[in-house]
Amino acid sequence: MNQIEEITKRNARVEGDKAWETSWTRRAIIAAGTYLIIGGYLSFLHVEGAWLHALVPVMAYMLSTLSLPLIQALWIEKIYLRNKQG
C-alpha cells in the first residue's frame, strides 16, 4: 500500500469519526441512555417524579450540544487562529 492510499484511508476514517461525533443519532443515543440511567437511579432511590427529574440532565446535555458549534466557531476565530498567526 502506498502513502497516498494510506492517507486516503486515514482521511475517510477521520471524516467518519467527525460525522459520528456531530450526528444527531449519537446525541439521541446519549440522551436516551442518560435519561434511562438517571431515571432508573432516581426510581431506585424512590424519588418522587423520578422520570420527570431525569429530564434535567438530558435537557442540559442537548442544550450544550446545540451551543457547542457556535462556541467552537468563535474559539477558532478569536483564539486559535489569532494565536497561530502571532
Image (cartoon, rainbow, N blue to C red):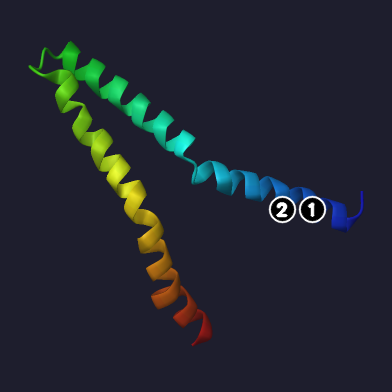
Q: Quick one: which residue is furthest to the right in this view? A: 1
Left or right: residue 14 versus residue 60 is: right
Q: In this view, does 6 lie above or below 32?
A: below
- Residue 85 drawn at (x, y percent): 52, 85
Question: Crowding at label 2, few (<14), some or many (≥20) Cα neighbours within 10 Å?
Answer: few
10 Å crowding of disc 1: few (<14), some (14-19), many (20+)? few
Query: Looking at the picture, which amino acid does disc 2 mark?
Result: Asn
Q: Which of 13 and 84 is in front in this view?
A: 13
Vertical position of residue 84 compared to residue 50: above or below: below
Between residues 39 and 27, which one lies in front from this camera angle? 27
Residue 71 locus on image (x, y percent): 35, 62
| In-image side of 70 versus 48 (left or right) | right
Residue 59 shown left or right of residue 30 in the figure: left
Compared with 82, 17 (above or below) is above
Q: State the residue position of label 1.
A: 8
Q: Is mark 1 on a helix, strand or loop?
A: helix
Q: For the residues marked 2 and 1, what is the alpha-carbon distance in whole angstroms?
A: 5 Å
Residue drawn 41% across the image and 62% down it = 72
Corner quadrant of residue 69: bottom left
Q: Where is residue 31 in the image (x, y as percent from the top left)?
A: 35, 31
Q: Which amino acid does label 1 sit on?
A: Thr
Residue 78 drawn at (x, y percent):
39, 77
Q: Check if mark 2's residue and mark 1's residue have beta carbons within 8 Å.
A: yes
Q: Name the residue under label 2.
A: 11
